[in-house]
Image (tube, rainbow, N blue to C red):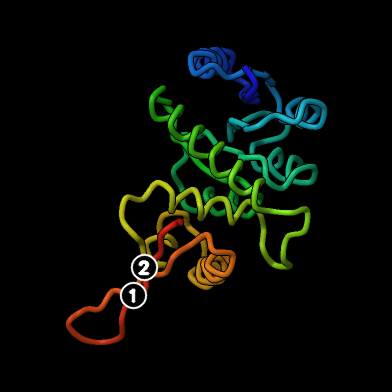
Amino acid sequence: MNTSILIVDDNEDIRFTLKEICEYANWNVIQASTGKRAVELFHMLNPDLVLLDYHMPDWDGIKTTKEMRKANASTPIIVLTVDERQEIANNFLDAGATDFALKPIKAPDLISRIKINLKIAKLTEDKDSAFVEKGIKQATMMSIKNFLIQQEQPTTINEIQLALPIAYQTVHRYLNYLEGRGEVEVLAQYGKKGRPKNKYKLV
């Protein structure tokens, strides 16, 4: 079991359930019941991915995400929460989270989500050097690539912006960056009238 998943949740039953799911998928599991302890383990063990609860005593998920991002900009952080509010999603994206999953967790969905995030992280690691262009955040770039890889059809900036959510101008800038790197293809869709609408897909 080479892939390691750091599970962070103050609820022992939830940690047990997540552990069972991860071990079923043949991933090694590291556990923490607090955000502070999770950051310590993050520094020491450098896990491949983090499953992170939002509501925890002491350090909540947002604080924990920010502290982890100080040490590593690219490790996928999947937030687990019952809170569907838009502002919470925005706060986590700003802090550096890469994906979200709503509780209660369904094993097939979570395994699929983890696999996609690990794949995106690997692709990003393979193509990136230590230098990242100014104004381009690894976490935001991974969120956009994560969304694109899950789409069967090319998608518009509006669709990406509404799903993540990230500001339209930000999505446009990152797509231009990814296109320049040869990682995104732009397809012009012509309607009956007006300007063509660009759609994007991951190469």
The spot of residue 84 in percent (x, y) is: 44, 43
Q: Quadrant of residue 42?
A: top right
Answer with left or right where residue 90 lies relative to residue 159: right
Q: Nearer the viewer, residue 83 or 127?
A: 127
Q: Secondary structure at mark 2?
A: strand
Near-viewer residue (159 or 197): 197
Crowding near the residue tagged with mark 2, few <14, some 14–19, many ≥20 C-alpha atoms within 10 Å: some
The residue drawn where x is 36% and y is 68% is 199
Relative to 43, say whether 70 is above or below: below
- Is the residue 48 above or below the residue 95 in the image? above
Viewport quadrant of the N terminus: top right
Tag 1 residue: 188
Q: Please state which of residues 45 and 54 is positioned toward the viewer in this rendering.
A: 45
Q: Residue furthest bottom?
A: 194
**Residue at the left extreme of this rendering:** 192
Gap between marks 2 and 1 measured at Cα:
6 Å
Element at badge 1? strand
Kindly identify which residue carries mark 2. Answer: 199
Q: Is residue 23 above or below residue 3?
A: above
Side of 188 where 72 appears, left or right: right
Residue 125 picture location, percent across and down = 66, 46
Please name the residue shown 68% across and 41% down the image: 65
Camera-side residue: 73 or 202?
Answer: 202
Asked if labels 1 and 2 touch by Cβ distance under 8 angstroms, the answer is: yes
Residue 47, x across and y down, in percent: 70, 29
Residue 49, quarter of picture: top right
Q: Amino acid at mark 1?
A: Ala
Badge 2 or badge 1: first in the primary sequence? 1
Seen at 57% across and 17% down, the residue is 15
Q: Is residue 13 left or right of residue 157?
A: right
